[in-house]
Amino acid sequence: MEIIDAIILGIIQGLTEFLPVSSSGHLEIGKAILGDTQVAEQSLLFTVVLHFATALSTMVIFRKDIFDLLKGALKFEWNEDLQFISKIAISMIPAVIVGLFFEEQLESLFGGNILLVGCMLIVTAVLLYLADKAKDTNKNVTFKDAFIIGISQAIAMLPGISRSGATISTSVLLGNDKTKAARFSFLMVVPLIFGKIAKDVLSGDLAYDSGNFTTLSIGFVAAFVAGLFACTWMISLVKKSKLSYFAIYCLVVGVIAIAYSLLS
């Protein structure tokens, strides 16, 4: 992989992990356009590195929240912090089930299936449009909400469905406060990302070549910096009800992706 490709894919991952436009979908489109010819194991390693970078950027942005949650949990009381962590744990259940029992079926949907990506981007557009029209509230995420949002997160494992878009939209459509919905959406994915990274590392499926160290490092930095920017920006956009712009974007890109897949 060329350095310029690593930078481009890193920026795509960093921006689209948080902006509601599907990081997996854009990475698939990006790889198709750039002609990613790497063997599967090398491509998987690069994807893992990029996800690690965005997970770290999330932790940097929400470092105070994470510290407060851990401090509250260590009091070993059924307080608001421990309840929030419990809700995150509940939200992880659907994605963990899909990841453990349907991994092969899920992976078969990746690998340049641009038609599927286009269709799922249109689904994302509809979700974002509906969420943008929802009324503002002060409601907190409940335990029931956490599980339903978790189902959305599991569905968003499909390429083209935006994880942040699906989870935030679902939360908002359930009547939750938009800022709290964004906070929950970003924090709930951190343990899943680290769990997936650990699983990939322990599986032995990652192929590391010392000659790729530079491109991996550059991709990591690009994704981390872009992630810091996108996460901060996304929180502001959700609060200001600006998701409709991304709905239009996803619709346009989805239509282009479908046209590309049918005409190529």
Image (cartoon, rainbow, N blue to C red):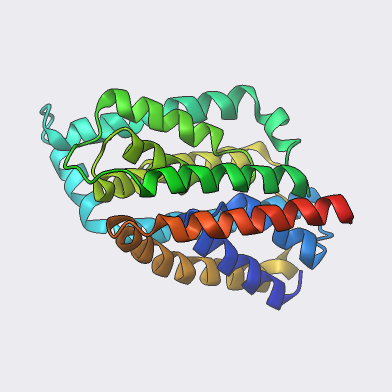
Residue 142 in view, yes or no? yes
Viewer can see residue 52: no
State left or right for residue 145 relative to residue 33. left
**Quadrant, the N terminus:** bottom right
Q: Looking at the image, which residue is at 64% across and 44% down? A: 159
Residue 185 percent coordinates (x, y) = 37, 44
> Is the residue 64 above or below the residue 76 in the image?
below
Q: Nearer the viewer, residue 167 or 199?
A: 167
Where does residue 12 sit, x and y in percent of width and height?
59, 65
* Relative image position of residue 139 (x, y in whole percent): 18, 37
At 65% from the left and 58% from the top, the residue drawn is 253
Q: Residue at x 13, y 30 (%)?
A: 76
State left or right for residue 253 relative to residue 91.
right
- Numbered marks: total: 0
229 left or right of 181?
right
Q: Is residue 185 above or below residue 75?
A: below
Which one is nearer the viewer's eye here, 202 or 44? 44
Residue farthest right in this picture: 264
Looking at the rendering, which quadrant does residue 23 occupy? bottom right
Q: Looking at the image, which is closer to me, 49 or 15?
A: 15
Quadrant into which the C terminus falls: bottom right
* Residue drawn at point x = 69 percent, y = 47 percent: 117
Q: Nearer the viewer, residue 55 or 145?
A: 145
The quarter of the picture where residue 93 lies is top left
Residue 29, image x, y percentages = 71, 57
